[in-house]
Image (spheres, helix red, strand yellow):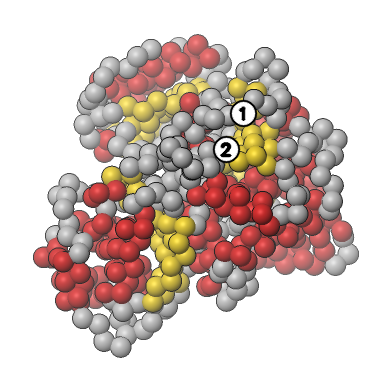
Amino acid sequence: MSINLRTVYAFAREMYPKISTTPIQYGTAGFRGKAEFLDSVMFRMGVLATLRSRYREGAVIGVMITASHNPEPDNGVKLIDPKGEMLESSWETIATDLVNVSDQELEQHVAKIIKDNNIDVTTSSHVFVGMDNRYHSPRLLKAVADGVIALKGNVREFGIVTTPMMHFFVVASNTKEAYGKPTEENYYEKLISAFEKLRNGQLENGKYRNNLIFDGANGVGARKMLQFLKRMNNSLAVTVINQGIGSGKINEECGADHVKVQQRPPISMPIVEPYTRCVSVDGDADRVVYFFSDENGQFQLLDGDRIATLVAGYLMDLVKSCELDLRLGLVQTAYANGASTDYIVNELKVPVSCVPTGVKHLHHKALEYDIGVYFEANGHGTIVFSDSAKLTISEAAKTKPKARDFLLIIDLINETVGDAISDMLLVETILNHKGWDVRDWISSYVDLPNQQLKIHVKDRNVIKTTDAERVCVKPEGLQDEINQVVANYKRGRAFVRPSGTEDVVRVYAEASTKEDTHQLAYEVGILVQKLAGGVGPDLVK
Ligand code: G16
């Protein structure tokens, strides 16, 4: 097969011209921005995915069109490597350079990528593409597909799917279906079958009630949850709200990010009994958080840290009761509530590590354990099992019924990436097995009050951090000032970092009381405005 790089330029010039000269950078999870500026980025990512597939000897590379938790006018692209991981970091630079060259330089630049990476352009290449339900996603999907076609790659479109479904399809295909079949139907089938076997007809147990409110963030997660319910034998009673029908916008006053950051319920919440389990996913259904209202109507959050501790505790019990010699570890980021880390270390006695924000970092670290549990506080996470751990559990399953449950738990988990629906089914299984309600779950430890702020600055890249983003090294002096402020608060902790998905600097603060936390977040926010080039309105206390 011969390819003509002139075609890449022709497509770019005629159909996907680069209309913005503002440099665009690869962020926490790929490229994000206003949808109207993304056509050329998408086309070029189709080109890149094709080259990456050839570089990886024809393995399937995934491309997901989504801006996940961002508002509806935004869109973005997440690239999926052959094992389901996010694009390898050395290729992030290649991707950034490729989206930033001019149309005139494109042909030469692609030739350079091919040469520098020794890519055999005569081999076959396979790219899977899927999208969320934003109104501009189909247009952007076509741009990706054209990028693949321009280099004579094979493209398979999956239509509207969640991000974790795309990761599942990529891994299923690259493992020659050992992980499952790369179809939507098989994805449902695998998860539902494991869930229903684990339920074993026991819909309620102890204080666990079969009743759940599901906030779909008006995104693809709502649609797919409805598809799950159609195929489930009434094994889980779910009311889906924010289904994306009518005027509701994706993530607007709903979804996991809204619930976690604003610490309040989503819009359109029905009136429910106190302590009813409610769950919120984000726009592409790779994050999930739980919440409920107590008898005083007080909102209570069960975020990614809570899911991580629940899951880690449950898996530890399984390891012990099956008498397995497996090392379990937990991975968090700086956003993890200090109380959760104390609980993991002192009560669960599980080793815990802290890495920078972004599932790519967490996933990588989690692979160091036999069983690696990773969750960001925002609800993004999963559990990964090493091949030898799976073998050990399979061996044990020959004689121990508990180990057979363990194998079903592994089937229920989407190991390829955080999967809101799979994580939710796992939490439901654990709560059911334990006979727990949300009161039991939340009582394992008391969260420190915490708050996040978004600060608008002229250039968020002036902020540089180290030590898993817990220390700010630039602008000079900012960390010293933060330290001085934090020292005034009991159990105070705060950090700042540039977002990799939005044009803001994020501030995180926690302290022993709510009032102190608000004051601390406010004071650190003011410092960022002062020392990092704040723009826009002053912070309101
Ligand atoms: C993405 C990443 C997450 C990260 C989040 C926020 O989530 O996949 O790992 O926590 O962005 O990142 P930042 O603080 O850098 O903006 P999503 O759900 O938007 O894809």
Task: Name the residue located 39 percent from the left edge and 73 percent from the top edge.
Answer: 155
Instruction: Name the side, left or right, on which 53 lies relative to 302.
Output: left
Q: Give the amino acid type for the residue marked by disc 1 in the picture.
A: Pro
Residue located beneath label 2 in the image: 241
Marks 1 and 2 in Cβ contact (< 8 Å):
yes
Q: Residues within 10 Å of mark 1 (few under 14, many from 20)?
A: few
Residue 445 sits in quarter: top right
Residue 430 sits in quarter: top right
The answer to whether residue 169 is visible is yes
Residue located beneath label 1 in the image: 270
The answer to whether residue 341 is visible is no
Q: In the image, residue 308 lies at what x, y percent?
A: 63, 41
Task: Name the residue located 36 percent from the left edge and 84 percent from the top edge.
Answer: 123
Task: Pick whichever, 364 or 35, lies toward us.
Answer: 35
Task: Pick whichever, 387 or 29, lies toward us.
Answer: 29
Q: In the image, residue 355 lies at what x, y percent?
A: 48, 43
